[in-house]
Image (spheres, grey):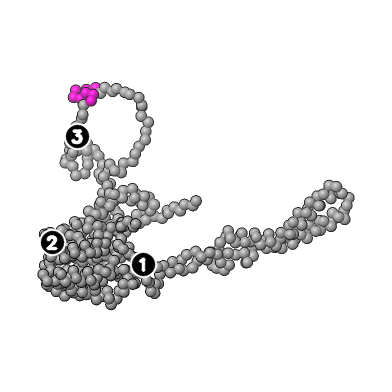
């Protein structure tokens, strides 16, 4: 068995192998720190690295040593307070030299171990065990991605891909085939020559005749080349189409007047987290951004996150636009269709039943997964209760969650896109 050890150095001149081993060992600490960082970060700071702190007690290495053994009784001189069997209370905190404690004139200790994880490592931990639910292989047209795979052995190819073992094996077989009979006769001639030299040393004529035959056979064998162009064998590599699933994510955000700046900020952070997740984990995926108030409009990424346009609230306008875009650009036989909607739940009274009907009849039968997050610290609005009827009908493909504060974004996101066990 062969082992390949990566000795490349990372940016800080540390071994990549050792760093990966360290990250695996303290995975739980790092994941907890990443979850806390996501909840307190701003929109523009979402995908930067993070400084991780690990308590000093958790990085201590176990030490094996030989004890004195046996049962011993030790009397410490000057002990006036304790006897055998007494329970000694733990010393109060604040001393020991630990960072964050109160000033003390005694004690010593160690600060927590602090190190920096990169942006890539931060995103790896952030999106660990997450995936788009119900992703299936759809019909692909015009796939332009290929992967190089082994396809056996060829007699022609690039010298850099020569198969040495197959080449030497072929050369050896050719030499056996071309010189096998000559070697057999040479073996008999050598044996006959030895017999004549031992039994008939005066028979010079026969000895000379056999020696000439041996020289002729050896010359014939030596004329067979050790390696011929016919023997060369090459590893054959071919490009094989790499089937990948195509998916589209519709992001629907409420920007009506009832959405406060804090509520919009939470919605934007949720969608930024979703956008990073999609772009990082999937190559063949498109994102459609839709903003809505009384009317809905498809926008680009910049306008979706930073436009200040606002107005009344008619949620059905966004769902109708989504259905139109689906029918026009994303055939259900080729695309996995996903949607994520964020709103404060405040909607025009007569519009919520319309939203339910659009979802149940025109959208949910054709999508892989639809998520709705309601950003409100108070009781649920009418839209939430209408969506509950959708969830009862489409239990596996529809999910809804409530966000109260920015701290809820990451836990809710993980719950919505947690990798599901396949049965």
Instruction: Look at the numbered disc 2 and give the secondary structure of its residue.
Output: loop
**Which residue carries the number 3 mark?**
91
Q: What is the CA distance from the residue labelled 1 to the residue labelled 2?
A: 37 Å
Q: Is residue 224 above or below residue 36?
A: below
**Relative to residue 187, is residue 291 drawn left or right?**
left
Q: Quadrant of residue 63?
A: top left
Q: Which residues are magenta?
A: 77-85
**Which residue carries the number 1 mark?**
137
Give the percent coordinates (x, y) of residue 339.
Answer: 25, 67
Q: What is the CA distance from the residue labelled 3 to the residue labelled 1?
A: 62 Å
Q: Residue at x 74, y 56 (%)?
A: 184
Give the percent coordinates (x, y) of residue 371.
Answer: 23, 64
* Disc 1 and disc 2 in contact, CB within 8 angstroms: no
- Classify 10 Å Cα crowding around label 3: few (below 14), some (14-19), many (20 and above): few
**Which residue carries the number 2 mark?**
380
Outermost residue on the bottom side: it is 328
Q: Is residue 326 above or below residue 34?
A: below
Outermost residue on the front side: it is 393
């Amino acid at each position: 068995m062969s082992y390949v050890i990566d000795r490349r150095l990372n940016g800080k001149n540390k071994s990549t192998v050792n760093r990966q081993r360290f990250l695996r060992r303290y995975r739980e600490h790092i994941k907890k720190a990443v979850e806390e960082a996501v909840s307190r970060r701003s929109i523009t700071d979402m995908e930067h690295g993070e400084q991780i702190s690990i308590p000093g007690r958790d990085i201590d290495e176990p030490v094996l040593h030989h004890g004195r053994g046996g049962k011993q009784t030790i009397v410490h001189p000057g002990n006036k307070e304790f006897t055998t069997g007494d329970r000694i209370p733990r010393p109060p905190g604040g001393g020991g030299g630990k960072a964050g404690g109160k000033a003390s004139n005694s004690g010593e200790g160690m600060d927590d171990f602090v190190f920096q994880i990169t942006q890539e490592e931060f995103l790896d931990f952030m999106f660990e065990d997450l995936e788009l639910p119900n992703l299936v292989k759809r019909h692909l047209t015009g796939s332009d991605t290929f992967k190089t795979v082994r396809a056996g052995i060829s007699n022609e190819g690039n010298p850099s891909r020569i198969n040495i073992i197959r080449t030497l094996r072929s050369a050896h077989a050719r030499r056996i085939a071309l010189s096998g009979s000559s070697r057999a006769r040479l073996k008999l001639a050598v044996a006959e020559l030895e017999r004549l030299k031992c039994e008939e040393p005066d028979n010079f004529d026969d000895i000379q005749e056999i020696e000439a035959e041996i020289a002729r056979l050896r010359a014939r064998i030596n004329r067979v080349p050790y390696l011929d162009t016919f023997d060369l064998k090459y590893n054959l590599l071919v490009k094989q189409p790499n089937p990948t699933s195509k998916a589209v994510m519709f992001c629907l955000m409420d920007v009506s007047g009832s959405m406060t700046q804090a509520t919009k900020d939470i919605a934007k952070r949720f969608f930024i987290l979703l956008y990073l997740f999609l772009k990082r984990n999937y190559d063949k995926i498109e994102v459609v951004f839709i903003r809505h108030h009384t009317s809905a409009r498809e926008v680009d990424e910049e306008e979706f996150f930073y436009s200040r346009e606002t107005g009344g609230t008619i949620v059905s306008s966004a769902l109708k636009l989504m259905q139109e875009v689906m029918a026009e650009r994303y055939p259900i036989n080729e695309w996995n269709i996903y949607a994520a909607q964020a709103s404060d739940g405040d909607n025009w009274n007569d519009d919520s039943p319309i939203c339910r009907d659009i979802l149940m009849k025109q959208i949910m039968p054709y999508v892989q997964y639809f998520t709705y997050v309601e950003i409100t610290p108070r009781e649920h609005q009418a839209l939430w209760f209408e969506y509950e009827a959708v969830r009862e009908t489409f239990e596996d493909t529809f999910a809804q969650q409530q966000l109260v504060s920015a701290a809820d974004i990451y836990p809710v996101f993980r719950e919505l896109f947690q990798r599901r066990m396949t049965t």
